[in-house]
Image: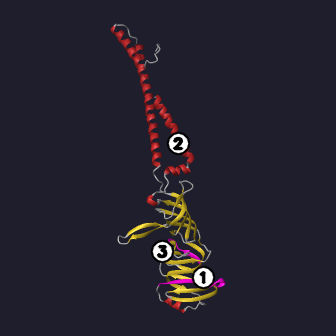
């Protein structure tokens, strides 16, 4: 092609002009050179190549837009989709707590008390030096009975009860609660149905025994062991610690099904029940929520679909139960079914912040680049 094209002249215009020239020559019976036909053919091929090269660019541009749209939708959806499971850490104060042991453990090595009441007993093993004929008869009646020990006396003669080496089997359900009596706690242990529970205790000082309506006063200058045998797979213990003494349990390596709520009948005629929370205060830290955690107010509901982990600290003091727990949970809800489970976006922003920043930069760069190409038509 020897002539120069105008700035606004297209290849198709050139082909049209060439074709008109050849037509004019044919009408005037002038000779048409083969090279003229070949040039038109070459131009047609150039147009096809050009149009073919533009088509993929268009497809690529739409593909990029579609990809960015998918990313935008994914980010939006991740704001609302909750993780199924999350790490939790709790520091709570409550008046009631329930949990289940996943393994056989020693829940406490020593608990000191001035009063101890135990129900559903089948037998008590007394030392031979303590001559309690009435108690021995109660043991042989083969019926369950209650037993209460109250310390008396002053100074060195003051009675002290010691619960020793409290071993509990796997799958024991434990319930701890404060009672209406000041500084008294209820401990409820429910072991699997095919098992019973034995409690080892030691007494020293002056005491009054009360068992099935029979009272006896006893005294011992040296510690005397007692073994209490439960009559069934569950046992209730009413415990009053000695003054200025904390009831501290050993760490529980694997606990599950923690509960801080109970059902209470509010209308007996209609058998209507309400869920009551015993939480006083505390904080729940979820792995993807702000560092300060979620602060609980008094009587606020806290429930889990599933929860399991380690009880690091468990203590009874001042008519309250203090708990420190760390583990994993599913389906965390509070009052009005408010979910505390983190969204996937919260999780990623907390644990993969640098990756999220780079992904955002790439996304914005791609969005800007595609928009620029769309505007310029390149």
Residue bearing mark 2? 360
Asked if residue 165 lies in the magenta stretch, the reply is yes
Residue bearing mark 1? 202
Residue 55 visible to an observer of this rendering: yes
Residues at marks 3 and 2 touching, judged by CB atoms closer than 8 Å? no
Between 295 and 117, which is closer to the camera in this rendering? Answer: 295
In this rendering, the label closer to the viewer, 3 or 1: 1
Label 2 secondary element: helix
Residue at the far left in the pictured view: 27
Q: Give the range drawn in magenta.
A: 144-172
Image quadrant where residue 152 sits: bottom right
Display colour scheme: secondary structure
Is residue 212 placed above or below 62 in the rendered structure?
below
Q: Callout 3: 10 Å neighbours few (<14), some, many (20+)?
A: some
Residue bearing mark 3? 192
Residue 378 visible to an observer of this rendering: no
Task: Say which residue appears at 50% left-offset and 89% top-offset.
Answer: 138
Is residue 274 placed above or below 352 in the rendered structure?
below
């Amino acid at each position: 092609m020897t002539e120069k094209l105008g700035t606004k002249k297209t290849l198709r215009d050139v082909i049209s002009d060439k074709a008109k020239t050849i037509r004019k020559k044919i009408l005037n019976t002038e000779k048409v050179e083969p090279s003229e036909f070949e040039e038109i053919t070459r131009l047609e091929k150039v147009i096809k190549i050009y149009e073919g090269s533009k088509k993929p660019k268009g497809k690529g541009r739409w593909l990029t837009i579609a990809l960015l749209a998918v990313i935008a939708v994914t980010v939006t959806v991740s704001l609302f989709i909750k993780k199924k499971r999350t790490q939790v850490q709790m520091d709570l104060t409550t008046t009631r707590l329930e949990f289940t042991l996943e393994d056989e453990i020693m829940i406490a090595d020593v608990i000191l008390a001035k009063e101890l009441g135990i129900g559903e007993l089948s037998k008590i093993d007394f030392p031979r030096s303590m001559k309690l004929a009435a108690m021995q008869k109660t043991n042989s009646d083969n019926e369950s009975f209650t037993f209460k020990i109250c310390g008396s006396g002053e100074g060195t003669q003051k009675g002290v009860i010691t619960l020793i080496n409290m071993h509990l089997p796997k799958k024991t359900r434990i319930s701890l609660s404060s009672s209406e009596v000041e500084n008294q706690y209820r401990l409820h242990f429910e072991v699997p149905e095919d098992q019973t529970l034995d409690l080892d205790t030691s007494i020293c000082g002056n005491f009054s025994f009360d068992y099935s309506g029979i009272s006896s006063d006893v005294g011992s200058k040296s510690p005397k062991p007692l073994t209490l045998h439960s009559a069934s797979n569950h046992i209730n213990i009413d415990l009053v610690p000695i003054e200025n003494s904390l009831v501290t349990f050993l760490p529980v390596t694997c606990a599950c099904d923690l509960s801080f709520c109970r059902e209470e009948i509010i209308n007996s005629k209609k058998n209507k029940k309400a869920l009551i929370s015993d939480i006083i205060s505390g904080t729940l830290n979820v792995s993807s929520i702000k560092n300060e955690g979620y602060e609980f107010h008094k009587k606020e509901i806290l429930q889990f679909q599933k929860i399991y982990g380690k009880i690091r600290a468990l203590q009874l003091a001042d008519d309250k139960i203090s708990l420190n727990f760390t583990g994993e949970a599913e389906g965390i809800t509070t009052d009005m079914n408010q979910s505390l489970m983190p969204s996937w976006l919260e999780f990623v922003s907390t644990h993969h912040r640098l990756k999220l920043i780079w992904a955002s930069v790439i996304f914005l760069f791609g969005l800007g680049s595609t928009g620029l190409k769309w505007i310029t038509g390149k």
